Image (cartoon, coloured by chain):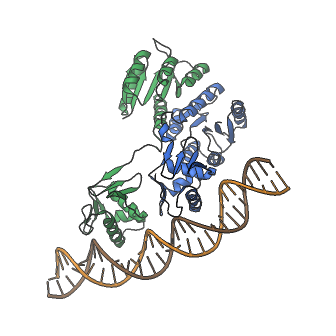
Chain colours: A green, B blue, C brown, D orange
Amino acid sequence: MTRVLVIDDEPQIVRALVINLRARKYEVDAAHDGATALQLAAARHPDVVVLDLGLPDMDGVEVIRGLRGWTRVPILVLSARHSSDEKVEALDAGADDYVTKPFGMDELLARLRAAVRRAEPTGGGEDDVLVETDGFTVDLAAKKVHRDGRDVRLTPTEWHLLEVLVRNTGRLVSQKQLLQEVWGPSYGTETNYLRVYMAQLRRKLEADPSHPKHFITEPGMGYRFEK
Amino acid sequence: MTRVLVIDDEPQIVRALVINLRARKYEVDAAHDGATALQLAAARHPDVVVLDLGLPDMDGVEVIRGLRGWTRVPILVLSARHSSDEKVEALDAGADDYVTKPFGMDELLARLRAAVRRAEPTGGGEDDVLVETDGFTVDLAAKKVHRDGRDVRLTPTEWHLLEVLVRNTGRLVSQKQLLQEVWGPSYGTETNYLRVYMAQLRRKLEADPSHPKHFITEPGMGYRFEK
DNA sequence: CCCGGGCGTCAGGGTTGCGTCAAAGACGGC
DNA sequence: GCCGTCTTTGACGCAACCCTGACGCCCGGG
């Protein structure tokens, strides 16, 4: 869940933001002054900060600098001031976006999404989807199968078939659905393809291919993958 | 030097932007329609894109999608339309910022600086830039490859290909993804390029190029870099 | 007991995809 | 304007993959 820190001294604005954000499944913390905000940011490590520049205890730009001293968290600035200098100062201090009041809630939320999105990890992120059984491991993101300490080589068709089955772990997948997903929409009756490729998958992955534990045949209906 | 791609069909706006950007030591490319823009982006790999939504040949949002299909380059949208829906659509399509015309040049430049700044690589991941194998070392930050005590000379295309593979160490990278990341979004089927350049990388980096240990072919699917 | 449908297995042949080499084309520097 | 480097393109041999048909097995029904 994405965590947002809202910093504003006007209660009605805070309330409106909190309600809208919570309704969209964000986790929200709120602060009414700069000192509290910096403490909260350090304690809670928000994924994005919404900051009103007009705070009672310190200059908004100082809050930005305070945050930028140790974090690159996206900062979205709110301000009643339209002057170009204000914007430039805030942005150059390290803010990521600047919205002038009064603002549209839709637009603010869209800018928030944009800020969160680009802070997401890039290709370096290890968001691999791992499916493990007692005999082998399937990594859907890396397109890798591991068994007995070594990688198993699968052909494109074998992979495609395995992928469909694994994404439906525990569920029955009909022969027609398998054929259409792997071989294309114009296929649907060539069940012999399935028999051949199922045998190859079992030979490569099952401990005892003739008595499969994971790739299970449902006669007349389809196949099922079980962990 | 930071490279900017300006996309706008109004000559006076383009001229104003180009003059201001060049004066601040940016390298500037300009396009006045979407098709040219996408080509230029692929060819020049800008560090930031300034995009006017009102183009003669295609919808601005389509340009955003065309870029987002293969790159995370910051996109700063210009538009004469103030409506909230327009902004939300552009931002959710992948834009990073949205500025309505008429705009102040100071503000635009500040937003541009903010967009470029946050796209910069994080200072923290120092150990990520060095990738070592038993035969050679890749330094992603310094753009250098070391082997047997000396630097290996790579052409720009070779380096780009290596970079994509190394950033996805252990993961399979599809032929289409490689082609689009290295040669641009309009490529995707020219697998002969890959064959030629993979052979060159292997010749320069593998101990035994005909039996590669690190640059592994997954027939019909793509390539994989392993340490 | 025989028969038929559905499934698993195996092996051969057409086709596709990959690696390699070489040469032409594009680009930039001197 | 010439030359060297990098990129693109084409051709060829070879290996791997995909499809196909044949056969045997199991099981339920006639």
Residue B175, image x, y percentages: 52, 57
Q: Is residue B52 left or right of residue A198?
A: right
Residue B142, image x, y percentages: 58, 41
Q: Is residue A34 left or right of residue B32?
A: left
Q: Nearer the viewer, residue A8 or C30?
A: C30
Specify whether residue B185 is in view.
no
Residue lying at the far front of the rendered structure: B149
Residue A67, image x, y percentages: 47, 23
Specify whether residue B3 is in view.
yes
User: Which of the 4 image quarters holds residue C10?
Assistant: bottom left
User: Which of the 4 image quarters holds residue A57?
Assistant: top left
- Where does the C terminus of chain A fall, quadrant-wise? bottom left
Q: Which residue lies at the image location 42% right of the left edge and 15% below the top edge?
A: A35
Q: Which residue lies at the image location 31% right of the left edge and 55% below the top edge?
A: A168
Q: Which residue lies at the image location 56% right of the left edge and 38% below the top edge?
A: B74
Residue D24, image x, y percentages: 25, 82
Count of numbered badges drawn on the protein: 0
Q: Nearer the viewer, residue B181 or B148?
A: B148
Q: Is residue B143 above or below residue B205?
A: above
- Where does the N terminus of chain A fall, quadrant-wise? top left
Q: Nearer the viewer, residue A176 or D9?
A: D9
Q: Is residue A173 left or right of residue B81?
A: left
